[in-house]
Amino acid sequence: MTKVVAIALMVGLLAGWGVFAPAAPAAEPSESAPTDGEEEDFEGLPEAPGREAVYFNCTACHSIRQVTQQRMSREEWDKLLDWMVATNGMHPMRPWARTRVLNYLTTHYGAEEEDWAGLPPGDGRDVVFYTCQACHSLAIVKQQGLNRVWWDETLTWMVEEQDMPELDDEDRALVLDYLVANFGPGSRRR
Ligand code: HEC
Ligand code: HEC
């Protein structure tokens, strides 16, 4: 097993259960991490990265409706998570898990349109926006004009050398399509 695979597995396991196990009596964890094929409807939460983390973290104490009836900006969701931890006894999440949860909440239960830092519309924009901006300005992304192979290399480099959390296959394909379509070899420098 390569180091990268081992780390990915470890992260997967943590993503699956480590984060919410202590506070989630209602959702008894099984020994194995959940798989994509798992039959679970998550009470209608839209399918996207972070759904499981939101569902299991938040339903440990109250109905998911408490969450889904809200519309808040990212900053407000961020404050709310602080409040859940500080006052309501929520187990703190690891930073990257928290980022995922925030991404999910902001994408699906956000207050108003984000301006996406000037990223053109398209599938994958939200994933690029939240994933890449966790560490650096999107200007660094927008100024590139790379073909698919080089974007692929760049993502691998981000994961292996810069500690970017690994995207699942579906998200990675989405991100690659988006980057090549908008910041490909033919794109004007922005
Ligand atoms: C350990 C228990 C616990 C966990 C875990 C928890 N909450 Fe809460 N949450 C509470 C309690 C208690 C309240 C009610 C607080 C009050 O009304 O004073 C609440 C209320 C809320 C409200 C309603 C706020 C309002 O103004 O009415 C929202 C939204 C919310 N939680 C979101 C979340 C989200 C999102 C998560 C998961 C990331 C989460 N909660 C996880 C305990 C928890
Ligand atoms: C965990 C942190 C992290 C995340 C997340 C991250 N990056 Fe980076 N990225 C870096 C760092 C650090 C550098 C600077 C590396 C250097 O110059 O040595 C960088 C540099 C870059 C560069 C510049 C390469 C160059 O030739 O100068 C590009 C392009 C890039 N990142 C794309 C992305 C994209 C696209 C994403 C999202 C899919 C992303 N990054 C997410 C940490 C991150």
Image: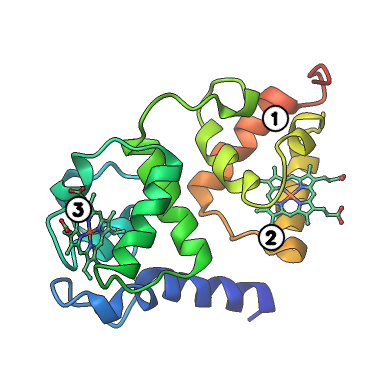
Quadrant occupied by the N terminus: bottom right
Q: Amino acid at mark 2?
A: Val
Cβ–Cβ below 8 Å for labels 1 and 2?
no
Q: Amino acid at mark 1?
A: Val
Residue 89 x/y as whole percent: 26, 73
Q: Mark on residue 131?
A: none
Question: Which residue in the structure is indicated by mark 2?
Answer: 159
Residue 40 x/y as whole percent: 19, 57
78 displayed left or right of 174: left
Q: Amino acid at mark 3?
A: Phe
39 displayed left or right of 81: left
User: CB of residue at label 3: within 8 Å of ligand 1?
Assistant: no
The answer to which image quadrant residue 142 occupies is top right
Mark 1 or mark 2: whose residue is earlier in sequence: 2
The answer to which image quadrant residue 82 occupies is bottom left
Describe the element under mark 1 as helix, strand or loop: helix
Mark 1 or mark 3: whose residue is earlier in sequence: 3
Dot 2 crowding, Cα within 10 Å, few <14, some 14–19, many 20+: some
Q: What separation in Å lies between label 1 and label 3 (alpha carbons)?
A: 33 Å
Residue at 62%, 50% in the rendered image: 134
4 displayed left or right of 64: right
Seen from the viewer's position, the closer of residues 167 and 103 is 103
Q: What separation in Å lies between label 1 and label 2 (alpha carbons)?
A: 18 Å
Q: Mark on residue 42?
A: 3
User: CB of residue at label 1: within 8 Å of ligand 2?
Assistant: no
Dot 3 crowding, Cα within 10 Å, few <14, some 14–19, many 20+: some
Residue 70 x/y as whole percent: 24, 39
